[in-house]
Image (spheres, rainbow, N blue to C red):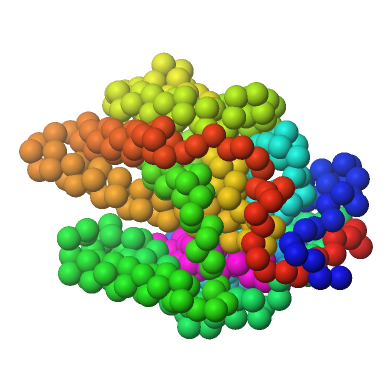
Amino acid sequence: MTGEHFQPETTALTDRQRWIALYVLCTGVLMIVLDSTIVNVALPTIQNDLGFSDSNLAWVVNAYLIAFGGLLLLAGRLGDLAGRRRVFLIGLVVFTVASLACALSPTQGVLVGARFVQGIGGALTTSVVLGMIVMLFPEPREQAKAIGVFGFVAAGGGSVGLLAGGILTDAISWHWIFLVNVPIGIATGLLARRLVADDRGLGLKHGADVPGTVLMVSGLMLFVYTILQVEQQGWGSTRTLGSLAVAFVLLAAFVVRQDRTANPLMPLRLFRSRNVSGANLVMIFTVAGLFTQFFLGALYMQRVLHYSPLEVGLAFFPSTAVVAFLSLRTSEQLVTRFGARQVLIPTLACLVGGLLLFARTPADGSFVVDILPATMLTGIGAGLAFPPLMQLAMSGATPTDSGLASGLINTTVQVGGAVGLALLATLAAERTSTLRADGMAEAAALNSGYHLGYVVGAGLVGAALLVAIFVLQTAKAPASVAADAAPESTETEYSVA
C-alpha cells in the first residue's frame, strides 16, 4: 500500500513495548555518550602505555570526533531513506567491533584508526534515535516524557563517563574503557532487533545525491578538524582561516545544490520552521557555553585544587543526579503544563547563573562552598533545558524527515561543543600565559584564565536565551501528527520481530 503520507503504525505496539524500545534505544545512546568522556580520563595512561607524544595523543580524541561530527547529519538522513532501525543496528555493530579493536590496539596507529571507525558507528547509532522516539510517541505528554529520558542520557551521560573512566582506569586498566562497550553493544543490538519497531524508509532513490553527500561530509569533517586544531594553530592563523573558508564554501555549495536538485539529500523545507532553526541555534550557543563547566571546571579541580580523576568524577556526580531527576520526573510535567518554550527560557537563565558562580571560584576553593552550588545550578538548568529544546528541534519534522531533524540537532550539539571548547580553551590559555609572564603564581594564573572562560561561556548561553525569547514560538502540535507532512510517499511497516 502506498499512501499520501509516511505514517508508521506505532499504534500496533503496546505501551509496554514502546517504553521497552525507548530504554533499548537510550542504552545504545548512553554507550556512545559515555565513550565521548570516558576516554579523556584515561588519556595519560594510554600515553604512557603506547608511547604517544603530547601532539599525537590528541588524535585519540580527534579521530573519533571528526568522524562522529562529520557524519551525523548524513547518518540521520540515511535513517529516513534506508530505515532508522537498520541504520541504528548497523551503527551498533560498527561501534562494538571498533571498541574491541580499540581495546586490543597494540600500536598508536591501530588505536587512532579504530577510534575513527568508532566515530562512524557512533554517528550511525546516535543520529536516528530522536527521530525514532518522536515516531514511537506521537502523543504530546508521552513524547515529552520520552524525550526527557533521552535528554537525561544526552546531558547526564558525560558526567557518568568521567566517573566510570576514573574507576575503570584506576581499578583495572585503560583497555576496559573500550571492552565494556562490547557486551553492552551486543546485548543492545539483540534487544533492539527483537523489540524496536522496524521501518522500510523512503528508499535511497529519494535522496541519492552523491555530489551533495560529498560536499556535506567533506565540509563538516573539514570544519570539525579545523576547530580541533585551533588550540595549536590559533584562530588568526592562515591555516585556520583558510580551512574554515574552504569548509564554509563546501557547505554553502551543498545548500545550493539541495535547493536545486530533484531528490535532495537534505530537504530545506525543514529550516522554514522558526522552532527548528531557532532550537538548533539555541543548542549551538548553549552547548558551546556549557562545555566550559565540564572542561575548564575539570581542569580547575585537577590543576588548581589537585583533585584526582576519580575525585573529579565524584564532584560532578551530584549535578548528574539532579539532571537525572529533573529530566526523568519533572521536565515532562512542566513542558506539558507550560509548553517547551516557556520552560526553556528560565532554565537557560539558570545555566547562566551557574557559569557565573564558577567565575568566582578561588584558587583555594572548597567543594561544598564553591563547586557544589555552581554544579547544582547548572544541573538544574541542563536537566530542565535539554528535553524541551530537543522537542522544539523536532517540532517541524514530519515522519519522512524525522531522522534528518534528529541528525541535525545531534550535529548541532557536536559543532557547538567543538567550537565552544576551542574558543574557551584558547581564551583561557592565552590569559593564563599573559598573567604568568607578568609574574603571577601558577595556580592564580590558571584560575584567572578559567574565570575568563566561564564568563564567556555565560555570555554564549545568554545569547541562547535571547534567541529563545525572540525567535522561538509556542509549539501548537507535535511534529509526528502534523497534517502538512512532506510530499514524498512510501510504505512503512512497523512490527516487533
Q: Measured from the top left, where is residue 41 in percent x and y?
A: 50, 49
Residue at 36% across, 70% down? 252
Q: Is residue 73 above or below residue 287?
A: below
Q: On the image, which quarter does residue 125 sit in?
A: bottom right
Is residue 21 at least partly visible in the picture? yes
As for residue 77 lying within the magenta part, the answer is yes
Q: Is residue 221 left or right of residue 322?
A: left
Give the quarter of the figure containing the N terminus. bottom right
Tell me which segment is drawn in magenta.
57-82
Query: As drawn, which residue projects farthest toward the bottom?
Result: 210
Q: Is residue 34 left or right of residue 399?
A: left
Could you say which is closer to the camera, residue 274 or residue 430? Answer: 274
As for residue 27 lying within the magenta part, the answer is no
Q: On the image, which quarter does residue 3 sit in?
A: bottom right
Give the quarter of the figure containing the C terminus. bottom right
Q: Measured from the top left, where is residue 477 in percent x and y?
A: 65, 40
Residue at 71% across, 54% down? 132
Q: Measured from the top left, where is residue 333 in percent x and y?
A: 68, 25
Q: Is residue 103 above or below residue 157?
A: below
Residue at 81% across, 50% down? 21
Q: Is residue 370 above or below residue 87?
A: above
Is residue 45 at least partly visible in the picture? no
Q: Measured from the top left, where is residue 140 in percent x and y?
A: 71, 37
Principal secondary structure, stretch drawn in magenta? helix
Residue at 79% across, 61% down? 189
